[in-house]
């Protein structure tokens, strides 16, 4: 089994996919990770079918999951929420769970009163990386952004040359 195959949960399974560190300067944050010996992906902008989603990122890919370095780049509701959270502090503000079925996760959250926002189709790098995201309404979890992702193209995200193989000894 390759690294990309391990990123898609089985039906009924849920796990932490990634955490996101909100920063003003993607390149400065990437240099910190690189100074620790980690590979960081190039800058990539998020897009919806309607246009820019308002954020860009760089990733520290791990054998399971990743660390996202996220920055607001446009004037959109999503970018403005990132800015509002960064006004409190730069740092980790997002926890994202991996799910095999974003639509089912949306229904489950709604049934439990979390009032999820509409399901979002996102892409990066000209559409070669595609995923669906379910976000819990900000007022339901004001302390941070909780979301769920269904990776549609994990093989495009977890490319062998980008993965950091960390070993604690």
Image (cartoon, helix red, strand yellow):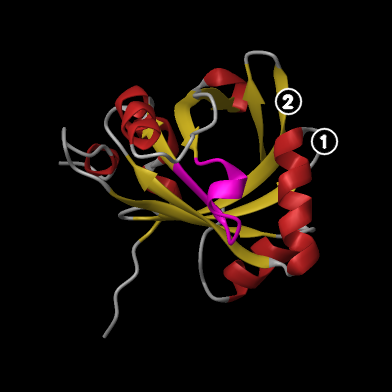
Q: Is residue 140 left or right of residue 165?
A: right
Is residue 124 highlighted in magenta? no
| Relative vertical location of residue 153 with respect to residue 14 in this rendering, above or below | above
Which segment did they paint magenta?
Answer: 136-147
Q: Residue at x 65, y 51 (%)?
A: 70
Q: Residue at x 55, y 76 (%)?
A: 36
| Relative vertical location of residue 128 with respect to residue 2 in this rendering, above or below | above
Residue placed under numbered mark 1 in the picture: 74
Q: Position of residue 17 (x, y in %)?
A: 37, 49
Q: Residue at x 73, y 70 (%)?
A: 89
Question: Earlier along the polypeptide chain: callout 1 or callout 2?
Answer: 2
Looking at the image, the residue that sits furthest to the bottom is: 169
Numbered disc 2: secondary structure: strand
| Relative vertical location of residue 65 with respect to residue 87 in this rendering, above or below | above
Quarter of the rendering containing residue 154 = top left
Q: Which residue is nearer to you in this view: 42 or 69?
A: 69
Mark number for residue 87? Answer: none
Residue placed under numbered mark 2 in the picture: 52
Q: Position of residue 69 (x, y in %)?
A: 61, 55
Q: Which residue is nearer to you in this view: 139 or 20?
A: 139
Numbered disc 1: secondary structure: loop
Q: Residue at x 34, y 63 (%)?
A: 165
State the count of labels: 2
* Marks 1 and 2 close (CB-CB < 8 Å): yes
How far apart are labels 1 and 2 at the CA level? 7 Å
Q: Is residue 49 left or right of residue 38?
A: right
């Amino acid at each position: 089994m390759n690294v990309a195959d391990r990123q898609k949960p089985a039906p009924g399974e849920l796990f932490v996919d990634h955490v996101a560190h909100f920063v003003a300067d993607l390149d400065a944050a990437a240099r910190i990770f690189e100074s620790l010996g980690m590979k960081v992906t190039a800058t990539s902008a998020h897009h919806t079918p309607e246009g820019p989603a308002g954020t860009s990122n760089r990733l520290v890919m791990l054998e399971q999951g990743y660390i996202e370095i996220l920055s607001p780049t446009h004037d959109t509701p999503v970018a403005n929420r990132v800015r509002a959270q960064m006004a409190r502090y730069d740092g980790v503000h997002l926890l994202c769970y991996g799910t095999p079925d974003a639509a089912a996760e949306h229904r489950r959250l709604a049934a439990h009163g979390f009032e999820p926002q509409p399901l979002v189709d996102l892409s990066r790098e000209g559409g070669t990386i595609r995923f669906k995201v379910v976000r819990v309404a900000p007022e339901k979890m004001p302390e941070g952004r909780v979301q769920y992702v269904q990776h549609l193209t994990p093989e495009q995200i977890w490319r062998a040359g980008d993965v950091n193989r960390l070993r604690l000894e």
